[in-house]
Image (cartoon, rainbow, N blue to C red):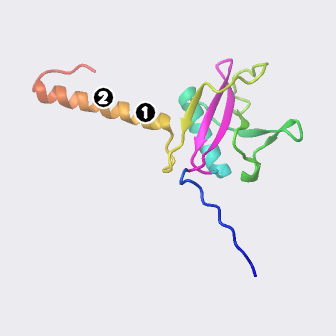
Amino acid sequence: KLQFLYFIGRGEKETMIIYISADIRREKVNLAVDFTTRPSVADLKFHAERILDIEAQGFVLDNLHIYEELLGSWVPVTSESLLHTHAQLFAFQPLDIEDTPVEGPIPGPSKTVHITPMGRSSYELEIARAQDAYLKSIENFVRKYPGRELLV
């Protein structure tokens, strides 16, 4: 007779936090990125570039490497199977536009960015909210003071 065991969680979603670092403006930057599920390599690269571009306008991702503890070295991220919670990644820009590499250890994460189930980062949501608030303030000014010139 076969028995099946089912493990039922408390309904809490497991997230995967991945640390992404890069050399930006002659400083090492490290961000904790909180994914609701294990990202594909394409999604990881997409979000890494978007998040780092917000940190440093004009950031272009060339390659992502993960620190492989068993090997004691950095290897290119080629498969989702390499990813695990608290993995440390390093984002490289193309050599022709890369900031000067910075010597030294990678610092702890300075910020946590949450990736929503719809694929938007908490940074982008904050920016969108700020833009909405700005537009509403302009609309309110125009309604309150019709015909007045608004210098922006």
The mark closer to the camera, 2 or 1, is: 1
Report x, y in % for residue 43.
61, 49
- In the image, residue 79 sits, relative to residue 54, either above or below, namely below
* Extreme residue toward the right, this view: 71
Q: Find disc 2 in the rendering and name its residue.
A: 134
The amino acid pointed to by label 1 is Glu
Secondary element at tag 2: helix
Report x, y in % for residue 67.
80, 37
Marks 2 and 1, the one that precedes in the sequence = 1
Which of the 4 image quarters holds residue 69?
top right
Which of the 4 image quarters holds residue 104?
top right
- Looking at the image, residue 26 sits to the left or right of residue 67; the answer is left
- In the image, residue 34 sits, relative to residue 43, either above or below, namely above
Numbered tag placed on residue 126 in the rendering: 1
At horizontal 36% and vertical 30% (from top left) the residue drawn is 130
Report x, y in % for residue 121.
51, 40
Q: Nearer the viewer, residue 132 or 68?
A: 68
Q: How many circles with numbers are drawn on the protein?
A: 2
**Residues in magenta, as a range:** 13-37
Query: Main SS type for the magenta part?
Result: strand
Inspect this view and state whether residue 49 appears: yes
* Extreme residue toward the bottom, this view: 1
The amino acid pointed to by label 2 is Tyr
At horizontal 53% and vertical 54% (from top left) the residue drawn is 11
Inspect this view and state whether residue 57 appears: no
Secondary element at tag 1: helix
In the picture, the quarter occupied by the C terminus is top left
- In the image, residue 29 sits, relative to residue 65, either above or below, namely above
Which of the 4 image quarters holds residue 108?
top right
Marks 2/1: CA–CA distance: 12 Å
Tell me if mark 1 has few (under 14), some (14-19) or many (20+) residues whose alpha carbon lies within 10 angstroms of its own.
Answer: few
At horizontal 72% and vertical 45% (from top left) the residue drawn is 84
